[in-house]
Amino acid sequence: MTDVALRPIEDADLDVLFEQMRDPEAVRMAAFTAKDPDDREAFDRHMVKLRTSPDITTRAVTHEGRLVGSIGCFVMEGDTEVTFWIDRSAWGKGIASEALALFLDTVSVRPLYARAASDNAGSLRVLRKAGFTTVGTEVSYANARDAEIEETVLRLD
């Protein structure tokens, strides 16, 4: 994979990211999403928090200069977790794997955790390719599916 890059998220990215994060198929696959993906005010408040908190690192993911998603890490209950969102038009092209590899080169915290809906084969494949191993599963409420579903918990040492 070539021409995948990470950069800080800019104000000009927000409209594109908002549209990407409300794609119904992508929302269903991600499962653990905003309560209402169409709520722009909630999205904007969330992005302010992500972009200003000293405990959160976020980056825009670009491919061939086009914004195709975001990646970041945050601390939850003492553990640092990584998360990513790639536009559905870029799925299956190795972009998420390349973005995660680049991001992991900049994050020195280990262990690093990740979570994905257990039926999200694509995200699980990306995480395992990067060296994450499954350490368990949990059942949690998924807004996008309005149901409790199983999520896989992974760790990178």
Image (cartoon, rainbow, N blue to C red):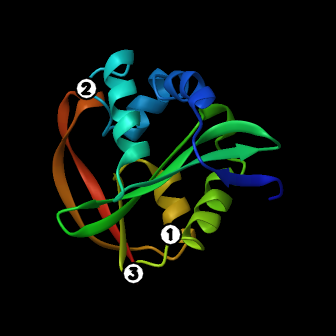
**Which image quarter holds the C terminus?**
bottom left
For the residue marked with disc 3, what is the amino acid? Answer: Arg
Compute the Cα span from label 2 to label 1: 28 Å
- Of residues 87 and 135, the one nearer the viewer is 87
Residue 95 image offset from top left, x and y in percent = 69, 51
Proximity of marks 2 and 1: CB atoms separated by less than 8 Å: no
Residue at (48% x, 78% y) in the render = 108
Residue 78 image offset from top left, x and y in percent = 20, 69
Residue 128 circle label: 1
Compute the Cα span from label 2 to label 3: 30 Å
Q: Earlier in the sequence, mark 3 or mark 1?
A: 3
Q: Residues within 10 Å of mark 2 (few under 14, many from 20)?
A: few
Q: Earlier in the sequence, mark 2 or mark 1?
A: 2
Task: Determine whether the residue tagged by mark 2 lies in a helix, strand or loop.
Answer: loop
Position above or below: 54 against 110: above
Residue at (34% x, 34% y) in the render = 46
**Where is mark 3, residue-wise?**
110
Q: Quadrant of residue 33?
A: top left
Q: In the image, 148: left or right of 119?
A: left
Residue 154 image offset from top left, x and y in percent = 35, 69
Residue at (18% x, 33% y) in the render = 147
**Where is mark 2, residue-wise?**
35
Task: Determine whether the residue tagged by mark 3 lies in a helix, strand or loop.
Answer: loop
Q: Quadrant of residue 70?
A: top right
